Amino acid sequence: MGAAAAVRRLHYEWEVIMTSTIRSTVETPDTSTPKAIPFAEKNARMDQIRMRLQGLNITGAGEPSHSLLDECAHEFETRVLKYLEPARCTSRENEITSGRTDKKLKLDAGSLSIKESKTVPDETVSTTYNLASCLPRRGIAYDFANLISFRAHELYVERLLRHLSLEPPPAFQAVTLAQVMRADREVFSFLVLTLTMLDRWTLHWRMR
């Protein structure tokens, strides 16, 4: 009984530590700068998506910003899925009209160079319409990076936003926009935890 209790305690502590680590990975912004995909490659891959998703407006406000595409591609290259808040799912239109380019001097290996960094202001997500406009851009960007198919992401978004129109039970309040956004974050936390567990189990069975 003592050995079984020790094993259960060890499993509990491991689960707590793993959950805390995954949550920190999801909620903490990535400090590394994503590598910019060449402009021609971006256009070619986006044209393929437009051909595949005909009927969907992927221009102007409906097109993901280049910074969002670079971020998703960076997640694919590093094999680290992170939560992208709806406000960070900026449009190409916003990137062109409101984006800002900052130039800074950088000393690297004894040589001085000028490094350019582009910043795009976050989108407004104060209304259901704003949120419903941001999430499809995230789905397109994930599809662009071969992380999540647009169809799978869109089915998830539809189910998520459906809660805003459901009639609440008696003595309960309707679901708020803040609750939906918090649920979106929790879903990705669970998704990252699941993927991490699958990777660990796959590595474990390969080593046997």
Image (cartoon, rainbow, N blue to C red):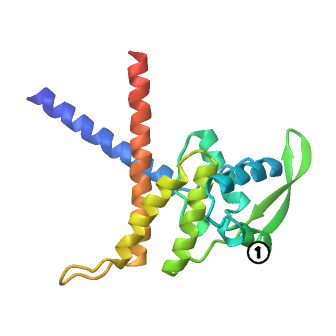
Residue on which disc 1 sits: 98
Q: Position of residue 126 (x, y in %)?
A: 52, 81
**Three-letter code, disc 1:** Ser
Residue 36 appears in the rendering: no
* Depicted 48 relative to depicted 176: above or below: above
Residue at the image position 67 percent from the left and 64 percent from the top: 58
Q: Residues within 10 Å of mark 1 (few under 14, many from 20)?
A: few
Indicate left or right for 15 with 136 as reference.
Answer: left
Q: Residue furthest top?
A: 208
Residue at the image position 72 percent from the left and 66 percent from the top: 92
Q: Position of residue 102 (x, y in %)?
A: 82, 64
Residue 177 appears in the rendering: yes
Quadrant containing the N terminus is top left
Quadrant containing the C terminus is top left
Q: Position of residue 89 (x, y in %)?
A: 61, 65
Indicate left or right for 128 with 58 as reference.
Answer: left
